[in-house]
Image (cartoon, rainbow, N blue to C red):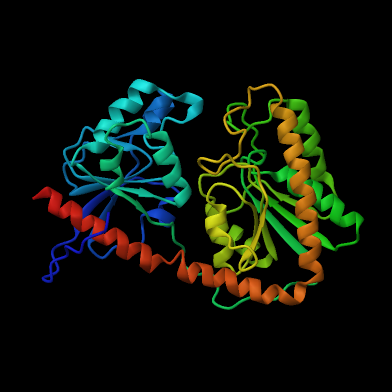
């Protein structure tokens, strides 16, 4: 569906837009829309009582003109709304799928009150279409569907030069899902072959038995954690966001060897610092990292329908731990080879750093995202009349 221009030349009053709170909103919603006045409050956290409630947002907000939610479908409201989503919508993923809830919420998305569905990536769009492929009114939902990438302001303006060491950084709390063992094994191998490597890890090192990518063996997890004691590795359990950005800017490469991420906003953080990204070629990462221009992609085994790891949501299947370990080993070897080339060809680093900054300027530009969302907000103004 093409976004139609409907803004009045007389500059109507700003729309009061109800949004939630959270780290992701500054990337996906809060871009300084000129036709919006944001009412930012946390939606009631019903999911703490009922796991399935993550799919809905209670929004009985009489003082707003429209609601812009993230992932959750607004209920108990007569206001028009938009939803920005990262993968499943309705949010009933495969590990806790509820058919009756999905069916009920699909019908709600079909109503005129739902003005637009904003996928964060082409990956999210594919996931949405695959999930709802049996819904009879899917073609009508597609008319509401848009792809608007998250956006980020530049953290620095000029490209960097590589340092006298190969400085790597990893950031992510769910470290087994985000592939930290891949980097730890690669660090060990790089030291063996004489590459001067320094690795910074920012992670609380969470290992949640409920995580859908979790390796099921506590013993295996402890074996991977033991690699943290290597020389040349610094671990920060937590740092404030500004400090994290400083660490990313000082690094030569962000290493993001994730098994599954709905987007991976830390990649945008890195690119905005002029720090190239080396990531797995899965989910939305191929849309973020252009191979050889602003970083590199590690070949990955994806399914053919959506573009995510073939073993996602299968951690109870026989052979899962073996598949996780084999994938970790294969990717660590690929990462070692890539980083050796990066070190040997470090004269090209400034070009990659410039490409990282240009990726933010062009593809993940805040002004562009703001303009697109402003036009959708005007459709909500029309929907109120």
The residue located at (36%, 30%) in the rendering is 134
From this viewpoint, which residue is outermost toward the left? 385
Q: Is residue 197 left or right of residue 327?
A: right
- How many discs mark residues in the rendered view? 0
The residue located at (69%, 28%) in the rendering is 320
Classify 118 as above or below 32.
Answer: above
Q: Nearer the viewer, residue 366 or 100?
A: 100
Report x, y in % for residue 175. 66, 41
Res. 190 image quadrant:
bottom right
Q: Nearer the viewer, residue 58 or 277?
A: 277
Q: Is residue 318 left or right of residue 191?
A: left
Classify 288 as above or below 130.
Answer: below
Res. 112 image quadrant:
top left
Report x, y in % for residue 12. 13, 64
Report x, y in % for residue 302. 60, 42
Q: Nearer the viewer, residue 330 or 354?
A: 330
């Amino acid at each position: 569906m093409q976004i139609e221009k409907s803004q009045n030349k007389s500059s109507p009053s700003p729309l009061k837009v109800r949004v939630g709170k959270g780290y992701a909103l500054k990337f996906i919603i809060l871009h300084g829309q000129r036709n919006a006045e944001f009412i930012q409050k946390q939606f009631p956290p019903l999911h703490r009582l009922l796991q399935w409630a993550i799919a809905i947002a209670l929004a009985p907000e009489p003082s707003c003109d429209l609601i812009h939610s993230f992932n959750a479908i607004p209920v108990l409201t007569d206001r028009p709304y938009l939803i920005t989503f990262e993968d499943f919508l309705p949010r009933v993923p495969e590990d806790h799928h509820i058919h009756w809830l999905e069916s009920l919420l699909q019908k709600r998305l079909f109503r005129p009150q739902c003005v637009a569905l904003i996928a964060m990536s082409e990956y999210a769009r594919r996931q949405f279409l695959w999930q709802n492929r049996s819904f009879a009114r899917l073609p009508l939902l597609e008319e509401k569907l848009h792809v608007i990438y998250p956006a980020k302001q530049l953290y620095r303006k000029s490209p960097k030069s590589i340092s006298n060491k190969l400085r790597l950084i990893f950031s992510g709390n769910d470290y087994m899902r985000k592939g930290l063992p891949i980097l730890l094994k690669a660090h060990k191998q790089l030291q063996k072959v004489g590459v001067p490597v320094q690795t910074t890890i920012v992670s609380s090192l969470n290992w949640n038995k409920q995580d859908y990518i979790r390796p099921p063996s506590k013993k295996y997890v402890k074996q991977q954690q033991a690699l943290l004691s290597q020389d040349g590795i610094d671990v920060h359990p937590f740092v404030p966001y500004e400090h994290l950005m400083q660490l990313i800017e000082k690094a030569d490469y962000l290493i993001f060897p994730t098994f599954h991420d709905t987007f991976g906003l830390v990649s945008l953080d890195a690119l905005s610092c002029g720090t190239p990204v080396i990531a797995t070629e899965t989910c939305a990462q191929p849309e973020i990292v252009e191979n050889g221009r602003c970083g590199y992609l590690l070949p990955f085994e994806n399914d053919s329908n959506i573009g995510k790891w073939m073993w996602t949501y299968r951690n109870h299947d026989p052979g899962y731990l073996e598949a996780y370990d084999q994938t970790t080993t294969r990717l660590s070897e690929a990462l070692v080879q890539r980083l050796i080339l990066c070190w040997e060809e470090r004269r090209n680093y400034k070009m990659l750093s410039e490409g990282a900054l240009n990726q933010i300027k062009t593809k993940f530009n805040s002004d562009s995202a703001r303009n697109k969302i402003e036009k959708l907000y005007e459709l909500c103004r029309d929907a109120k009349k």
